[in-house]
Image (cartoon, rainbow, N blue to C red):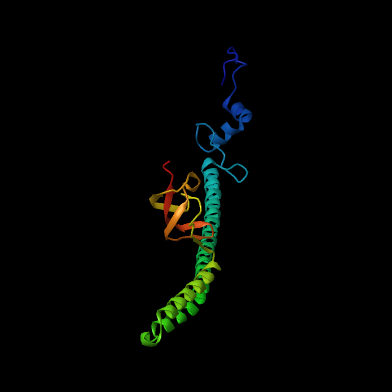
Amino acid sequence: MTDPNVKSDPTTTSSFENAAIDPATARAAQEGGDGPPRSPRATDENPTIDQEIGMVAGALEREVAEQKEKYLRLYAEFENFRRRSVKERQDAEHKGMQNLLRGVLEMLDDLARFAHVDPASTDARTMVEGVAMVERKLLKSLNGHGLEVIDPKGHPFDPALHEAITTTPAASKEEDHLVAQVYQVGYVHNGTLLRPARVVVTQWNG
């Protein structure tokens, strides 16, 4: 029973009124607790941080797997290309060597015939002419494969192609730095120097 002389404070509300005003507080009171309202459970529309991390991690794993597959595919293609290139280069080298040897076979036959002649029935001149013939045929065959002979007797000395092993006095100033004698010819293959010609060079001392 309330005292009629006690006036109620209009700024205060009853627990029933508070519950009516704040539904969350009302739910907490119904569930038997006076603490703050519980966080709503995460749904597909409102994922938690752990769920978001899991989705990002899954996407990254898929991306890594795709990139790894691309890398392995490219690596396999490169290995196939490398092996094919090596085989093609070896086949080209073998074919070039076979062509070279095929052109030398005839000269080998000529040398074999000269090696088995009877010295008693063959004069020296015939032997010399036969060897010279084999030399010409061999050089002709090698010329077909890009080989050139450097025989610079009487030509100006060229340090890029010639190697001076000694000098000899020149008869006049006009004959200075000319190749007077070739001790050993040189060879060039397709523009590349294989061996310089070893020569004697004239020198004017006047």
What residue sits 47% from the left and 46% below the top?
Answer: 172
Quadrant of res 30: top right
Instruction: Pick the residue in front: 188 or 169.
Output: 169
Instruction: Pick the residue in front: 64 or 3.
Output: 64
Q: Position of residue 9 (x, y in %)?
A: 60, 15
Q: In the displayed structure, would residue 112 be above or below residue 83?
A: below
Q: Is residue 205 left or right of residue 83?
A: left
What residue sits 48% from the left and 48% below the top?
Answer: 175
Q: Position of residue 169 (x, y in %)?
A: 40, 48
Q: Position of residue 7 (x, y in %)?
A: 60, 13
Tell me if I can see residue 149 in this picture.
Answer: yes
The total of numbered circles placed on residues is 0
What residue sits 39% from the left and 82% below the top?
Answer: 115
Q: In the displayed structure, would residue 203 be above or below residue 38?
A: below
Q: In the displayed structure, would residue 88 be above or below residue 159?
A: below
The quadrant of the picture occupied by the N terminus is top right
What residue sits 39% from the left and 87% below the top?
Answer: 121
Instruction: Pick the residue in front: 43 or 131.
Output: 131
